[in-house]
Amino acid sequence: MELLIVISIIVILMLIAIPTANTIRKHTDEVSAQKSLQTIEQAQSMYATNYPVNGFACDLKSLSGEPSSGPPSPTAAQLINGQLATGIKDGYIFNITNCTKVTINNNDRITGYTVTATPATIGKTGDRGFCVESGGPIKADPAGGTNCTQMVQ
């Protein structure tokens, strides 16, 4: 009988703890997504400085690269790590979209972009989507998409 009481108490505690753990994990994933957006923003700034003819990068692959494959280049600048370069990190999917360009002397120069971070599974890995436009603040979409209108504090 005592064993059943102990098991019942453990089950009750688990039922209370599991939803709290999921909430904490979602919050942690959202914070990680915001920090990753900041990392991508910093990498974009360095990329534009290192490769002024190209402007900004229009894909994550251009910001990444392995040092063992040779020196940095416009197609592999070695500015972000491999996990973030895959576009999937801590339950969020990252993309560089809405690239705007100008053509100067037959070279396309990227002058603007939007970086998005959306939950892989809305409600499980995160509730909000995040966006940042070239050099701007991080904004959120409470529905988990890329319609970012709310400032992130």
Image: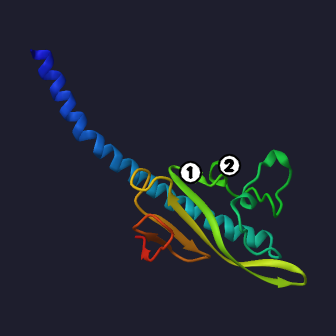
Q: Position of residue 12 (x, y in %)?
A: 18, 34
> Tag 1's secondary structure?
strand
**Across the whole image, how many numbered discs are drawn on residues?**
2
For the residue marked with disc 2, what is the amino acid? Gly
Q: Is residue 127 left or right of residue 36?
A: left
> Tag 2's secondary structure?
helix
Kindly report the distance in space between the C-alpha atoms of the residues bearing marks 1 and 2.
10 Å
The residue at which mark 2 appears reads as: 82
Q: Is residue 4 left or right of residue 98?
A: left
Q: Position of residue 32 (x, y in %)?
A: 49, 55
Residue depicted at 54% across the width and 62% down the height: 117
Crowding at label 1, few (<14), some or many (≥20) Cα neighbours within 10 Å? some
Q: Is residue 76 left or right of residue 9?
A: right
The residue at which mark 1 appears reads as: 89
Residue depicted at 67% across the width and 64% down the height: 43
Of all residues, the one furthest to the left in this rendering is 1
> In what quadrant of the picture does the N terminus appear?
top left
Residue depicted at 74% across the width and 72% down the height: 48
Q: Position of residue 145 (x, y in %)?
A: 48, 66
Q: Position of residue 115 (x, y in %)?
A: 60, 68
- Between 94 and 135, the residue placed more toward the observer is 94
Tell me the quarter of the picture where residue 16 sits. top left
> In what quadrant of the picture does the C terminus appear?
bottom left
122 versus 115 height, above or below: above
Q: Is residue 66 left or right of residue 26?
A: right
Crowding at label 2, few (<14), some or many (≥20) Cα neighbours within 10 Å? some
Residue depicted at 83% across the width and 60% down the height: 73
